[in-house]
Image (cartoon, grey):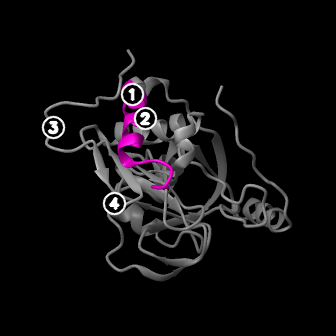
Amino acid sequence: MNKAASTSGAHPFKRYLAAGDSGVIVNFADHDQNEATLLARGLADTMRAEDDPLLAGVRDYIPGMANLLIQYDPLRITAAELISLVAPRLSALKIDAIPEGRLWRLPVLYGGEAGPDLNEVAAKTGLSTDEVITRHSANILTVAIMGFMPGLGYMKGVDPALYLPRRPRPRQHVPALTVGIAMDQTVIYPLASPGGWNLIGRVPVRLFDPVREDPVLFRPGDRVAFEPVDETMFRELWQKAEAGEAIISPELPS
């Protein structure tokens, strides 16, 4: 049965919150977090597809884990007008009708220098390293939101047996394209940066490439399947990617 988004109720929170003088936050804190993430993305996609002239005053839709930030031009639309357009679309939004995203199959070299925390993750979870790899690559994860670096997607759906906190001391340098896990999520560092996630592998695919037609690989809602490869295959794929060859392509939802 389809489940419509609630727009009212006895919850002690507000559905709409101001974000400065040019932003409105649509708050889904009364929903389960997975539902909230889905609703935020679904509402953003719905609003982007609208051709209402007033919505031309919207500058951006930014889905979060449990909310949607809508940035607008206050000279073209007011917050009250914006909310009046959001409310009926939110009421009509059906969780089950929000489409799946594209599916990316990403080759991963687990362990060794590529994933220096794999052994520690195995020890902390009581699993063998092979079991950690098997469990991490068994689930198809979903890009819930995009993060603070270009191309960084927070992927949810990690096997519960792998839930771990972030490392107590972040590293000062994490190489680009390293795969990290923490809590119920996986990330891939698109660029070299400091980082506190548990590092278990590396992918050969650039998540952010400013010269590519579409510089950012992931979109919120995309699905990701990790596929283990050995070092020989990884190096081969890496060289092809560095030469500008597209080594993967997304599978579109059926």
The mark that comes first in sequence, 2 or 4, is 2
* Relative image position of residue 241 (x, y in whole percent): 79, 63
* Relative image position of residue 9 (x, y in whole percent): 18, 30
The residue beneath circle 1 is 88
The residue beneath circle 3 is 11
Q: Nearer the viewer, residue 123 or 188?
A: 188
Q: Which one is in front in this view, the residue at disc 4 or the one at disc 1? A: 1
Callout 3 amino acid: His
Q: Secondary structure at mark 4?
A: loop
Q: Give, as a single range, the part of the protein colored magenta.
A: 73-91
The mark that comes first in sequence, 2 or 3, is 3
Q: CA distance from mark 4 to mark 1?
A: 40 Å
* Relative image position of residue 33 (x, y in whole percent): 32, 43
The residue beneath circle 4 is 164
Q: CA distance from mark 2 to mark 4?
A: 41 Å
* Relative image position of residue 233 (x, y in whole percent): 76, 59
Q: Is residue 67 visible?
A: no
Q: Secondary structure at mark 3?
A: loop
Which residue is depicted at the point 48% across and 55% down?
75
Query: Residue 30, relative to residue 8: is it above or below?
Result: below
Figure quadrant of the N terminus? top left
Q: CA distance from mark 3 to mark 1?
A: 19 Å
The residue beneath circle 2 is 85
Figure quadrant of the C terminus? top right
Q: Which one is in front in this view, the residue at disc 3 or the one at disc 1? A: 1
